[in-house]
Image (cartoon, rainbow, N blue to C red):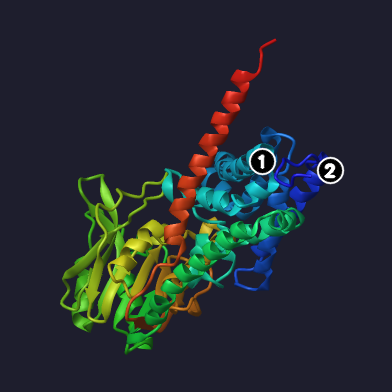
């Protein structure tokens, strides 16, 4: 039997429903704890079951099973959408689920057209291509629930999308192990030699990144940072809370407040905070509005220097859709601080590698992230958001100080270890840490792999659509 031909026994309804239920259960098990623990290994079960779901009699059925799986994964994890958008949350859950359905549809189309083994090689490419596109490249981009966020392991080398590539590659190989063995037995010695050398080239490319990663671990000068967790604080309360934080951390050099801490009608930083910085000879990073006109503004993080002047400011690069969140930043720069180069990204900006990559490429040795997570959105929203900073820190090998309005604020070392954090919903809680800035950060492998996978996925989809169109034209009508 030719192992390259399409499966003659696709999954029936009973097995498909079982794979769907197991996939959903494994996904939620992997996301059960906010800590990066062994529970994250359940993500392999999710990937394996999703791969098995792709073997359907037709593409339409594969799409609907993938859509149902995606919806049952997204809706419980992102139930806080209902608190924000009401019934419109159902549409947003379906949009997220669509990408899972698209994955199962494309892979099913490949299986029906080219067989399981040949399509098995496409599985990690298609998954990574879709995951990168839905997380980074279109209007409603949203990277949360990326399977790379369940584990820190491998983040520094492979990156959050590279972990997804590996998980689905391994899962596809296990799901098709017997066909793969038969495939390799059918290969000639020449073909096996080519495959072996391609594998060696891949290992060599990975090894090129190891010196950069090792260099990024070399420590530079330390910095003591303090943040005060407050949600929409009154203007006259802020200097008092900063005094309290300074009294407890007299050696702190830099203070941080959350996104939208300032809500003064004229925008900018009030004189009271400039005076506080001048009187105490401290730097302050604080979120507020930088108005262009009376109604149009940039959601901005201002850096106030020890002389009371604004020494740097950075606007939010990716304002949240459907929110009054300002204009997108026209430019991204790093702050040449007294301790080294510091990148500032605001709230959800940290979730987008195309934002944070630019800061690391400019030499950022530390990321400061003023964040607005409203308390009424619930604990689980805060817990999901807290997964992002440790993974990003491990990816780049640089520390991150993330100060949220109502929790969970974090100070994360360059290896992804959370060295200090605050609780959810505790107004006025103080976060303090001493972080050590590395000589430089580095980008993981997936920053080059993921865009290639997206392009390859587009090509594969176009080929499948063309071949389907060609078959329909060749079929006699009537």
Q: Where does the C terminus fall, quadrant-wise?
A: top right
Residue 5 visible here: yes
**Residue 469: x and y, percent?**
57, 25
| Viewer-side label of 2, 1 | 1
Q: Residues within 10 Å of mark 2 (few under 14, many from 20)?
A: few
Q: Nearer the viewer, residue 344 or 357?
A: 357
Q: Nearer the viewer, residue 420 or 227?
A: 420
* Residue at horizontal 31 percent and vertical 68 percent from the top: 343
Q: Residues within 10 Å of mark 1 (few under 14, many from 20)?
A: many
Q: In the picture, residue 364 is in which quadrant?
A: bottom left
The reply to whether discs 2 and 1 touch (Cβ–Cβ < 8 Å) is no
Q: Pick whichever of labels 2 and 1 is earlier in the sequence.
A: 2
* Residue at horizontal 74 percent and vertical 53 percent from the top: 179
The residue under label 2 is: 14
The residue under label 1 is: 108
Left or right: where 236 falls relative to 99: left
């Amino acid at each position: 039997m030719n192992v390259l031909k399409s499966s003659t026994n696709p999954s029936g309804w009973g097995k498909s429903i079982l794979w769907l239920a197991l996939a959903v259960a494994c996904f939620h098990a992997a996301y059960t704890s906010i800590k990066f623990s062994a529970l994250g290994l359940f993500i392999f079960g999710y990937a394996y079951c999703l791969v098995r779901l792709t073997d359907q009699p037709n593409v339409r059925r594969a799409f609907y099973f993938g859509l149902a799986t995606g919806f049952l994964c997204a809706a419980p994890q992102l139930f806080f959408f209902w608190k924000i958008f009401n019934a419109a949350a159902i549409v947003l859950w379906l949009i997220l689920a669509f990408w899972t359905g698209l994955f199962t549809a494309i892979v099913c189309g490949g299986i029906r057209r080219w067989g399981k083994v040949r399509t098995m090689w496409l599985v990690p490419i298609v998954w990574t291509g879709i995951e990168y596109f839905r997380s980074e490249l279109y209007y409603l981009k949203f990277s949360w629930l990326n399977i790379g966020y369940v584990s820190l392991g491998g983040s520094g080398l492979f990156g959050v999308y590279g972990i997804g590539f590996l998980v689905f590659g391994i899962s596809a190989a296990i799901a098709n192990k017997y066909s793969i063995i038969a495939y390799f037995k059918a290969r000639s010695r020449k073909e096996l030699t080519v495959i072996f050398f391609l594998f060696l080239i891949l290992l060599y490319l990975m090894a090129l990144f190891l010196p950069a990663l090792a260099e990024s671990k070399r420590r530079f000068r330390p910095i003591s940072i303090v943040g005060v967790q407050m949600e929409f604080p009154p203007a006259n309360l802020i200097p008092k809370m900063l005094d309290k934080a300074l009294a407890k951390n007299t050696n702190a050099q830099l203070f941080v407040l959350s996104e939208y801490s300032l809500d003064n009608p004229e925008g900018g930083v009030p004189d009271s905070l400039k005076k506080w910085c001048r009187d105490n000879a401290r730097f302050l990073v604080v979120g507020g509005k930088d108005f262009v006109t009376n109604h149009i503004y940039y959601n901005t993080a201002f850096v106030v220097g020890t002389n009371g002047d604004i020494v740097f400011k950075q606007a939010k690069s990716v304002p949240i859709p459907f929110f009054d969140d300002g204009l997108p930043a026209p430019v991204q720069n790093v702050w040449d601080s007294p301790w080294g180069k510091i990148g500032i990204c605001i709230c959800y900006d940290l979730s987008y590698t195309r934002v944070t990559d630019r800061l690391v490429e400019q030499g950022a040795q530390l990321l400061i992230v003023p964040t607005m997570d409203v308390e009424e959105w619930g604990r689980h929203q805060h817990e999901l958001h807290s997964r992002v900073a440790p993974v990003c820190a491990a990816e780049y090998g640089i520390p991150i100080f993330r100060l949220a309005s109502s929790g969970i604020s974090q100070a994360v070392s360059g290896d992804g270890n959370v060295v200090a954090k605050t609780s959810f919903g505790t107004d006025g809680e103080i976060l303090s840490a001493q972080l050590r800035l590395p000589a430089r950060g580095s980008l993981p492998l997936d920053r080059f792999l993921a865009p290639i996978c997206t392009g390859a996925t587009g090509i594969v989809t176009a080929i499948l659509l063309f071949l389907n169109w060609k078959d329909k034209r060749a079929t006699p009508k009537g």
